Image: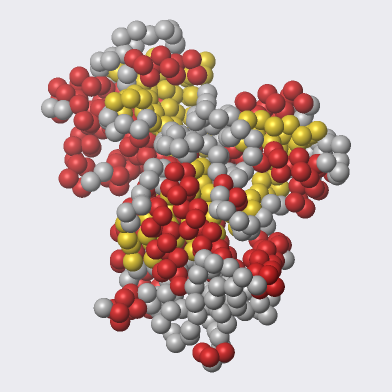
Amino acid sequence: MQSKKTKTLEPQTETKLAELQQTRERRTVLMQGNEAVAYGALDAGVNFFAGYPITPSTEIAEILSVELPKRNGVFVQMEDEIASICAITGASLAGAKSLTATSGPGFSLMQEGIGYAKITETPCVVVNVQRMGPSTGMPTSPAQGDIMQSKWGSHGDSPAIVLYPDSVKESYELTIRAVNLSEKYRTCVILLLDEVLGHMREAVCLPDLANVRVISRIKPTVPPHWYKHYDENQKYLSPLASYGEGYRFHVTGLTHDSHGFPTNKSTEAFEMMERLRKKISYNIRDLVQIESHKMEDATIAIFAAGIVSRAAKAAIVMARAEGIKVGLLRPLTIWPFPDDAVRKMLRNVETVIVPELNQGQFIGEIQRLTKDKSESNVISLQRCDGTLFTPNDILRKIKEVS
Amino acid sequence: MSYEIRLSGSGGQGLILAGIILARAAVIEKKRVTQTQSYGPESRGGYSRADVIISDTDIYFPEATNFNCLLALTQEACDKYLFDLRDSGILIIDTTFVKNLALAAENTYEASFTDIAQEKLGSPISTNIMSLAFLVKITGIVKEDSLKQAIAESVKPAFVDLNHKAMKIGFDLAKNYKK
């Protein structure tokens, strides 16, 4: 039993990849956001999925339940989301690249497990296709209510990496990036999607597997008795051994020392907390990705993420036709927050409009950076009714402030 | 040029599948396309709509807001979306369910799609494909062959013939349409 299980978690071999490349369609096809996430996960080398299907993320589980077994991967439908996050954390410690997909209610349940993956520095990815909340809310309606939950959802200080795509193609790309970053930084990376994006279909041509950049965790090179599970001497990115490879380590959600054993010493606690913080904040240039759209001559800027940025782009076309100089700043990585890019935006424009499908979550971050930096006017535009901003909604606001 | 189409009716009428097929036909013709949808939590009944935007340039906002063409299969859907149709937009209604029309638009096309499907194919199940084919023929937004291919790629093999038959009926209805 034990040996069989180890076998299923073997990484894909060269020949297997070549085979898959031949069977995969490489022409332009109509693809759904959720489908793109599933194929992104497969192309990034994910070989373990445990989850509890929930609208509007169901297609991710559905596709992986078919595709993973074909590739010697494992698909498990769990009893709930708490078990799901625990299962992907455990699978990752055994050497798998693991992922789960959920929506708001499940994401809330997963929070403790996400904190566990972060404190134990175990790579894994949680995809949250956001729906209207709170609670069960409106399962088939869009909202951006989980911006703050994705950062602060788990108790204790635990710096987050959260990515946020705006198109089907980008859902594929950022899923791969999420898996890569989780492996590189040994943490739980979160991918946020909007309900509309998860269900939306667009014409997409996926790249050849040979052109997909895949990162896998660094393995220890020291003899087993020298191995430290948390090695702070490695620029905050320490090698990771898997269970069953002969290395001894202890895994606990308690604050721990570099071998993973519980500690109450403040010096060791400080070391661990600093490592969790610094591995994100010292690598902010690697983590932050933004799109700057028509910002060169803009006097008004829109700050928007995900699907809202698409309405903003349409509004920009209309506003510019009338001679109003508007641009868009769009974060692809929302946490860590792109402070530098936002500061630059605040210096260069007179007004910033922040449209979001919630009761005001991004706006607080912009205001945090506004205080001492500039005199630009920051305006919040909120919607929380299960529908999208239309380009006209944003255009109206642009005209109001121009 | 960007062309916005909304297919509307109630859950279970197959409008989202129709939207996917239309979008797939546009992909076959190498056009840019987005297809979005909105529906209630029920699998049958309730409202349902599918939006398809077909364009030669990048599509930013993925939902249809000012339609070039509206297909309404129920009275409720017709009343809800009628006034978002462009001035010169094409309105196609299923007179089996749409009895009152609050707008006298110049480009209105009427046919009792559901009744015709029941009569000619023995079931209303292919109303979506029949009315989609009608829409394609009237608007010319994609080629007939592309639609045929998209249907074959989108439905289970056992149902391809039935849907191609429904498509043919839709094309003929449009060809012989008299105002």
Report the residue at 21% width, 30% height from top.
B125
Q: What x and y, as percent, mark residue A270?
A: 69, 68
Residue A247 in sight here? yes
Q: How is the image coloured?
A: secondary structure
Res B138 → quadrant? top left
Give the quarter of the figure containing the N terminus of chain B. top right
Q: What x and y, as percent, mark residue A3?
A: 30, 82
Residue A39 in sight here? no
Report the residue at 39% width, 42% height from top.
A55
Q: As drawn, is A7 to the left or to the right of B119?
A: right
Give the quarter of the figure containing the C terminus of chain B. top left
Q: What x and y, as percent, mark residue A311?
A: 60, 35
Viewer-closest of B90 and A228: A228
Report the residue at 73% width, 31% height from top.
A379
In the image, farthest residue toward the front: A264
Judge whether B5 appears above or below A280 on screen.
above
Q: As drawn, is B67 to the left or to the right of A23?
A: right
Report the residue at 27% width, 29% height from top.
B44
Q: As drawn, is A23 to the left or to the right of A320?
A: left
Viewer-closest of B79 and A118: A118
Q: What x and y, as percent, mark residue A306?
A: 58, 43
Viewer-closest of A262 and B162: A262
